[in-house]
Amino acid sequence: MRMKVSKWKKTIILDIMLAPALILTLIFSYIPMAGLVMAFQNYKPALGMTGSQWIGLDHFEFLFSIPENIQLIWNTLIIAGMKMAANLIVPFIFALLLNEIRRIFFRRMVQTIVYMPHFLSWVLVGGILIDLLAQNGGLVNQTLTSVFGMKPIFFMGDGDWFRFVVVVSDVWKEFGFNTIVFLAALAGINPSLYEAAEADGAGRWQQTWAITMPSMLPITIVVGTLALGSILNGGFDQIFNLYNALVFDKGDIIDTFVYRYGIIGGKFSFSTAVGLFKSIVSLVLIVMAYRMAYKLANYRIF
Amino acid sequence: MAINIRSTLLALLSSLMLSSALTGCTGDSEDPPKEKDVEEESFYSAPFEDGKYTEPVTISTVFPVSSNMKFKNGENIEDNVHTRWAKETLGIDIEYLWTVSEQNNAYETKLRLMLTAGEKMPDIVAFRGDAALISDLIDTGQFTDAGVLFDKYASDIYKSAVAEDPTVWNPLMRDDKRMGLPILENAFNNDPVMYIREDWLRKLNLNAPTNMTELETVMDAFTHQDPDGNGENDTTGLSVGFKNDLNTWMSESGWIFGMYGAMPNQWNKTEDNQLVYGSVQPEMKPALLKMQEWMEKGYISSEAGLYDETKATEAFTAGKSGIIVGPYWMTGWPLPDLQRNVPDAKYRAYPLPAGPDGTIGRHGTSISSGAILINKDMKHKDAFFVYQNYLFDHWANPESTTFPHGFAKGYDYDIGPSGEIYQEAQSDKIPGGWVDAIRYSLTFDGAIIPNLAMNTLAKLAEGAEPANQYEKNLAKRIPEQLRAAKIVIDQKDTVMPEMFTGAPTKTQLARGDMLTRLEKEVLNKIIYGQASIDEFDTFVEKWKSTGGDQMTEEVNAWYQSVQK
């Protein structure tokens, strides 16, 4: 009994320090969840949440009943899936390479330069990309035609190329930022392991395979698991700034559709329903990935 | 088309006559000098003398403060030269329940939140923008039949301004009641004219095109004969940008369809008084084929489908494109950039050319952009009209001398030591800088008589001497702008107006985006040559069967309901 009381006394300060964060989460993340009822209503602003008519799963049915919307969901999955894989692999490899650079100053400089694009807005990058990839006079196509003698490629107007552009530009913009987490993990590896390996006569490749890679596995799993949560996020601001009518069939995603559809009529209910649908899918995927990570790699986040 | 215009003109005329007859009647019955004392009390809801409430009455409202609105002398929207003016001149206290800085549609969002929370609405809600929000606001049932009040209290100038186009009431009609007052804008403001590089025409020994053949000759020369003389094949004939829409507000291509009697993405009237959606009319086909051909020949940029309205102007202002079509105000922005980029470049405004059978068509400008709603429970409903009448009679009225140089001295004008007038262009000479005080007004721009500004500009362009202060002020604009305005007025019979101005219908809300997406995808692919022109017919079939027919029915039902 006395043990318990003193333990409680010990943690009370810490509990108080934690409280603001908990309260904020409660107010801004949990209480608004009550608004999810809108997804099952024909929500009319004038009538409010309590007065609007209940319509059950109509909005969800509507989302799946239209053939074009199935295409949207596929587009989203494909684009988000490719982005997820690329955004895991590229920063990982880049972090490994950067870690091999011995000159601290050069390494820091490269690191800073590559994460800069993360802070650019897609409005800006979109404008630059459209010019850069133009069929006539765009830098990329000029190089392709004059140096390689190829025909110009209509990057922004051909659905398959468009997806490619979306993924590559997203990786270009984000890989520097995503590298940070891997670099931190690399810095955390005990140097004595490398010293021991060196004493045993292991080369750089062997050190990488036997020490660096296994040490990086947990963080890679964490990053991958968390990324799964955004499998239905194709990246609204990016697509919205880059897409056009020619690539609607391959480039239009759920978010851009909700934006257009919601903006026209102020359709709170439908947007909420889509949001809820996305959250449920994310939750299921995260739980599954987490279980798998636990089973296969014996790694736990919580 | 010509018949349509004539019939609307006739309707306009007859309604003008009718309204003047009506006002004549009311003038007789309500304003006879003998009965004045008896009538006075029932006419205004509070003691009123010499155009002013003797005891100040209050109008409560809400207001968006846009980012280009400036304040000086430590003022804000609640307390400034405009609120003091309203109190001193009219005896009206303006009370703001809340104001919001207008970014990312914050005003609209806040109004929607008010709706959501079921809050009590202020006396006056003025809103410019989404018709759906206005419609939702009306449906709360908190607002009164503004039409009755308008008939009773509005001044003759206010009435005739609204009567210039009776269709401005259409979006506000509910069961034959006018549930709001339209906010009027300048007519023809966004109607397109054609801008051509005059120096290129001269250099290549060409004349401005008046028809399709001449237009193609000019575009071909602009594309292939190196008009900028840099030895590279890097110019295009025409700048268009249809990422958003074909028929749009700048860098637009609606006029190409107009040459064939079509006008995409708007509702057009047929000869048997039905509304049809422009993008699915058979007249679209030859125009689409033309655009396909132009893209193939390089007359228009292969990026045109990726460019929005602003981005598409860049080629023209960079001196790499010879023609662009847009409103008369492009002479103020963004066309001056051309001189900055290419110092010896010269452009000139020209009328839109005619199609193969002589047809010219362009989109019009809606003269109403929003609405003023009046609360049922407003205590002094006449106060709003006292306010708005004054601005129509004194601010908008060109004959008035109440506001000769601007709204308030020291704000949007100042008078120098020797009597010279400082306005926006001499902003640095006004202590604290030029501030557009009329923008503080309840209806955003004071009061506008729709057809006045453009017609006056056109008249001045023809060389008329400015007759009054209003005309003198307009005459100070750049000459090319006057010329463009005159062309807009000269070609006003070619306007193909958007006939549907109601709130979105049920099918539009449910299926609208799917249909627009289908439309854009197919039309773009045809222009880009990625789909053959035959797919247009498949598209029309699909459009009709997946909601288009239903939409057409609903739109026509609406149209019949406002025709009465």
Image: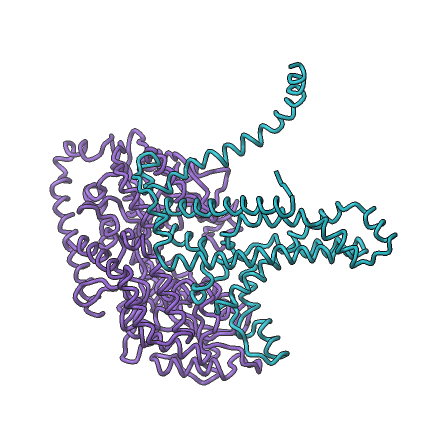
Which chain comes out cyan in the rendered image?
A
Q: Looking at the image, which residue is at 22% across and 49% down? A: B159
Quadrant housing residue B285: bottom left
Residue furthest front in the image: A295
Quadrant housing residue B7: bottom left
Please tell me which residue lies in front, A133 or B465. Answer: A133
Please tell me which residue lies in front, A229 or B375. Answer: A229
Where does residue A169 sit, x and y in percent of width and height?
A: 58, 61
Residue furthest top in the image: A2
Which chain comes out purple in the rendered image?
B
A86 relative to B354, above or below:
above
Q: Looking at the image, which residue is at 19% across and 42% down? A: B148
B131 relative to B152, above or below:
below
A254 relative to B540, above or below:
above
Quadrant housing residue B440: top left
Where does residue B512 sit, x and y in percent of width and height?
A: 33, 57
Instruction: Evaluate whether residue B494 shows in this view.
Output: yes
Judged left or right of residue B164, residue B463 is right
Where does residue B147 sit, x and y in percent of width and height?
A: 21, 44
Q: Quadrant of the N terminus of chain B?
A: bottom left
Instruction: Evaluate whether residue B88 shows in this view.
Output: no
Where does residue B401 sit, x and y in percent of width and height?
A: 33, 49
